[in-house]
Amino acid sequence: MRKSKVLALAVTAGLGIGAAVAVPATAAQSAPAQVKAGADQAGACRLDATNPGLKHVIYLQFDNVHFTRDNPNVPSDLEQMPHLLNFLSSNGVLDSNHHTPLIAHTGNDILTSLTGVYGDRHGQAVSNSYRYFNPDGTSNSASSFAYWTDGVADTSVPTPSDAAYTMVTKDGKNAPAPWVSYTRSGCDFGAVSAANTILENTTVDINKVFGANSAQAAEAKADQAKAQADYVGIGVHCAQNSKLCAAAGTGASADLLPDEPGGYTGYQALFGAKSVDPAISGTGVVNSTAGTQITDSHGNPGFPGFDGMSAANSLGYVAQMQEAGVPVTYAYISDAHDRHAAPYGAMGPGEAGYVTQLKTYDDAFSAFFTRLAKDGITTKNTDFVVTSDENDHFVGGKPIPANCDGVTTPCSYAQIGEVNANSAGLLATQQGVTTPYKVHSDSAPNFYVTGNPAQTAGSTRALEQAWAKVTAVNPITGNTDTVNSYLADRTEMKLLHMVTGDAARTPTFTSFADPNYYVYAGAPNCNSSCVALGPGYAWNHGDFASDINTTWLGIAGVGVKHLGVTDKVWSDHTDIRPTMMALTGLRDDYLSDGVVLTPFLKTSGMPDPLEHSAHQYAKVAAAYKQLNAGVGAFAAATLTLSNKGVSSVSTGDATYLADEATLTTLGAERDALVAQIAAALDDVAFGHGRLGDRKADLLVKQADLLIKQAQQAAAA
């Protein structure tokens, strides 16, 4: 579900490693549906500049699918999907030391994976919704999920007071879109529920793309369910002169990106199954991998809803697009641990319904890989990249029976569900604090104090100090827990890449809570219990916690080494994009926050500068990740220091102010060094630069020294 969105499986078919210059956009030929895709159907589409034979890219992103076990006796999600796990580990690499940004939520995680930049540069660091301050100091809620060019997606008011884009850069422009590098290179880009690359709703998105007085908007008002099936969740961004878009006639719409670096004119897109399905299928029908027509719960053909994007449905769309000559496809797959039909609710590890659902996912991958192989789409001409948006933390009691494994002996749970904590009631009854505020409810709750006071204001500091002391009795364990684990004010949020180009959406402060707790703001009393199990959801994320922030990444195909499962390389979601660009020989029109994961790639497919500097590049990249990543060593140290300072009570607030000064200095030094390292790495990966031993050693030494300084400050 979009509360906690998806695992990312990126499949890049026939990608070439490392050419640094994008191929100019030219005509992309698309074949009729159901023909062999192994031939060069894409015509002028070029993905093989450095890896000859690369013809396809398939990117799949799961919602919360785990490689590690949540119960030591129960096989993990991937272990219960052997057709996927074996495919990746046998044909490439599965990095089990992959990480999320912060906050670790579906929207931020997927958008970071798609773009290769952290939330401060794409605008959705706080997700899957966020709040924004109005000029009068109140705050409203908006959705993180809105089409790429939409403004603030708040349907509670006719016109939001915040005029920023949903996807906003640090300088207030619309963030660069992830399909542009492909379409400029002559490749149609298929989007299957991939966050914000398609219409996400039948309100602001339809009005933005089609117009408030359009036939599509009229349908949305008359029959919301049918409009969702027709226009939401599915799309194709076409290359110039794309035969697919040309054949769609009036079904194609202008693909407008107002602030794309270098401009983006003359491109079209198909928005929604009503336009896409007949373009990719001769019959106009798209089937799941099980062979049944994809429909919503009302029987409407087309998009079945985001919760309905099971492996069978998403992979069915991906296969159909690839067979129709759409060589690049990005898709989302919904989670397997929630019941997406009645009776709704969460399931624990090894529960019968959970195991059954994972079996259907495994069956879907089996059918998918078999179908692709018959089409001639294999690891010989395709690159597969797979990751999860995040791991999540299971909140529940002990399994029954204790030794259940889920497969032969089903598990059950007498207690299951995140621990819901009413922050307003707990603050009022325990600390006597009733400062007005709103909260973005989460396991990493973001507080928006009414009036939008400065971070040093007395009202802000009193609320932070009080929240740091709040406790709750866990109804599962009976233990009294401190709800907050880490506090980050705006200084620290900037260090964690959480402060965007839209100042109105910056929270007053963020609490990374005990991962068992889901924090909301209800009544400022506990007349109704302030702490209770919420059995509808049992999988928490968002937090700064190792079991949430550590996930996995799989890459298989052209130009990829066969390494199996490894934890030797520390990576995060920003690294997916530049690695795919290196494989395909393309490049983005902006500097990534990530690195090319050279230890996973064959040197024969790298551009000359990267091949010649591969050792030095990997060494510097490893240090850079620990310095700049949202959950790297530097961030962990500064967050520890921030929590000490923000929680502190001292005369004149001296402790807090001193720690803030230290964090500000560390942040400025970090940003300067990061800019220097990022430019050097980009020049090697996508330019013509070289990185010698002397320069590499100096950059690593500087990064290590700055990390050590942060750790010493945190330990003082």
Image: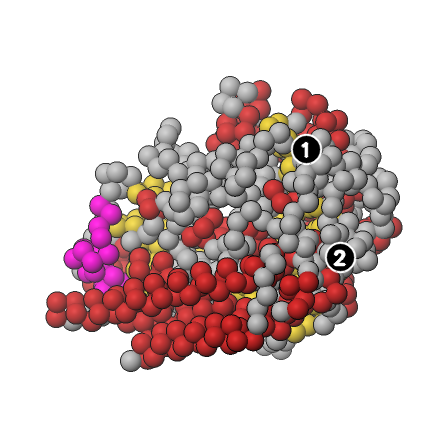
At a point 57% along the width and 72% down the height, the residue shown is: 692
User: In the rendered image, is residue 127 in sight?
Assistant: no
- Is 479 positioned to the left or the right of 228 in the image? left
At a point 60% along the width and 56% down the height, the residue shown is: 687
Residue 421 colored in magenta in the image = no
Q: Which residue is mark 2?
A: 51
Q: Which residue is nearer to you in this view: 683 or 324?
A: 683
Q: Which residue is mark 1?
A: 240
Mark 2 residue type: Asn
- In the displayed structure, would residue 584 be above or below residue 167? below
Label 2 element class = loop
Which quarter shows the C terminus?
Answer: bottom left
At a point 76% along the width and 44% down the height, the residue shown is: 322
Q: Position of residue 170 (x, y in %)?
A: 41, 48
Give the magenta range.
451-469
Q: Position of residue 124 (x, y in %)?
A: 45, 49
In the picture, the disc for residue 646 is none
Q: Position of residue 316 (x, y in %)?
A: 74, 45
Q: Which residue is nearer to you in this view: 66 or 239?
A: 239
Residue farthest to the left, as pictured: 651
- In the displayed structure, would residue 322 be above or below residue 447? above
Q: Position of residue 479 (x, y in %)?
A: 37, 74
Distance between the alpha carbons at the discs numbered 2 and 1? 24 Å
- In the displayed structure, would residue 139 be above or below residue 524? above
